[in-house]
Image (cartoon, rainbow, N blue to C red):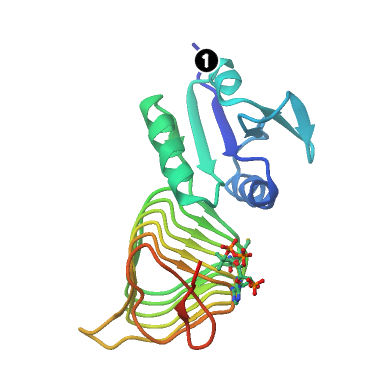
Amino acid sequence: MTSSQSYAVFGASGFGREVMPLLRQQLQARGVPPLDLVFVDDAAQPAVVNGHRAMTYAQWLAEPAGERFITIAIAYSVVRQKLVERCRADGVQFVEVRASNVVQLDECELGEGAILCPFVTLTSNIKIGRHFHANIYSYVAHDCIIGDYVTLAPSVKCNGNVFIEDHAYIGTGAILKQGKPGEPLIIGKGAVVGMGAVVTKSVPPGVTVIGNPAKLMNK
Ligand SMILES: CC(C)(COP(=O)(O)OP(=O)(O)OC[C@H]1O[C@@H](n2cnc3c(N)ncnc32)[C@H](O)[C@@H]1OP(=O)(O)O)[C@@H](O)C(=O)NCCC(=O)NCCS
């Protein structure tokens, strides 16, 4: 048994390749000695991606390491949760990835395993669940409550007093109108807000909304 630490990014697709340099810079800034930081992806043939080895999860587990840390860079939240459960069962720990220019103000609670991309801002008095993804330039304002496995695509504007329930996905550039204290605007569990939507009213669980003002998408 070795006492070494092994770090990985789960997912070598577009988002994973955006997350890898953030994790690398974060570990360097913390003074963690140079590591063999790898991509884990079950679709991967053993290969090198952007200078990092890529391998399947089973191959990663088979490599000697004292402690293993991973970030799940998979935007689809249902798959993200499955991978989290698989990793936890194998004793793998989760590393938060946070770009160096992320702004976080007062009393902001964040669950394990978040990925906060460059230019993300979390203001004050916010509660966010586990394995949250906030892509580039997104913000979450005061008094918001966000569940587990929520995904904000790039440039989401989540204004104050908005509650976003578990597994909701908010598309690029969407704007969520502020709620009121005690009367939040709610994005329901598993709902999808399309890119560019302007959400002025609460969205029920499981539906997709698009447009300005956002309406149910007819499929
Ligand atoms: C809303 C969304 C989930 C719908 O996806 P989908 O079911 O695959 O929809 P389709 O692409 O088949 O489009 C169906 C119709 O809705 C329209 N449409 C799709 N998304 C739309 C949106 N956000 N706003 C307005 N119209 C939209 C399409 O133009 C198409 O119209 P048509 O039938 O007249 O041709 C998706 O378009 C979206 O907005 N996803 C978020 C993308 C994103 O932010 N990605 C970030 C990557 S980091």
- Residue placed under numbered mark 1 in the picture: 2
Pick the residue in front: 137 or 183: 183
Residue 139 is situated, as x and y percent measured from the top left of the image, at: 50, 75
Could you tell whether 2 is left or right of 20 in the image?
left
Residue lying at 79% horizontally and 41% vertically, measured from the top left? 50
In the depicted structure, whether residue 190 falls above or below residue 211: above
Pick the residue in front: 117 or 28: 117
In the depicted structure, whether residue 70 falls above or below residue 156: above
Pick the residue in front: 208 or 178: 208
Residue 49 is situated, as x and y percent measured from the top left of the image, at: 77, 37
Residue lying at 63% horizontally and 50% vertically, measured from the top left? 19
**Element on which disc 1 rests:** loop
Q: Quadrant of residue 201?
A: bottom left
Residue lying at 62% horizontally and 25% vertically, measured from the top left? 56
Q: Quadrant of residue 44?
A: top right
Q: Quadrant of residue 215?
A: bottom left
Residue 133 is situated, as x and y percent measured from the top left of the image, at: 50, 58
Residue type indicated by callout 1: Thr
Instruction: Tally the numbered discs.
Output: 1
Does any atom of ligand 1 lie closer than 8 Å to the CB of label 1? no
